[in-house]
Image (tube, rainbow, N blue to C red):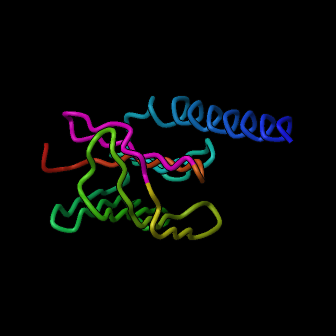
Amino acid sequence: MKKYIFIFIAAVLAVSCVQDNLMEETLMPQNDVCVIRKGVTECSYDENSWQMGYNASENKFWACRDDMGEYFILTLKGSPVAGQSVKGDLTFTTSTTLVRQFGVKFEVASVEESGLIKLWNSNSSLGVVVMKLDNL
């Protein structure tokens, strides 16, 4: 029985290390507003062909391509504070579908002076980088 408990604990630790590595490798280097899922960038803001917005009273962040072919909307249940977690609802497009995730618990990986905020959910390997525009 002890052998199985040890194997289970080792497997849990290994999975959490992989998740932490994925966050460090895919989310933390990002300097652009984007959505990343399982290491793949699903949406990425381009200042030449995208618009973005922020509603402070609703903690709502959004970005969309000018033709609305790609977009994402993130509404947080509270203000993001580095090192804490915050729940949110995320809707985004991929090349083939619309994805909606409600009640996602994000770890606030960083809040930068520039207004850039990096959020991570390890359960679904989901990262979101948004910008508080009131800092500009």
Q: Give the range drawn in magenta.
A: 106-122
Lateral position of residue 132 relative to residue 124, left or right: left
**In percent of the image, x 44 and y 48: which residue is there?**
34
| Above or below: residue 90 compared with residue 41 | below
Residue 92 pos. (x, y %): 49, 64
Q: In this view, does 46 lie above or below 70?
A: above
**Quarter of the image where the N terminus is located:** top right
Where is residue 115 shown, x and y percent of the image?
22, 41
Identify the residue at image location x=54%, y=50%: 126
Horizontal and vertical percent position of residue 79: 23, 55
Q: Residue at x 39, y 63 (%)?
A: 88
Q: Is residue 87 magenta?
A: no
Q: In this view, does 133 lie to the left or right of 77?
A: left
Q: Nearer the viewer, residue 134 or 46?
A: 134
Vertical placement of 75 versus 7: above or below?
Answer: below
How many marks are shown on the rendered structure?
Answer: 0
**Residue 87: where, in percent of width, then height?**
38, 61
Instruction: Please tell me whether residue 110 belongs to the stretch shown in magenta.
Output: yes
Majority secondary structure in the magenta region: strand
Q: Which residue is drawn at 44% across and 32% down?
A: 28
Along the line of sight, the residue nearer the viewer: 108 or 129: 108
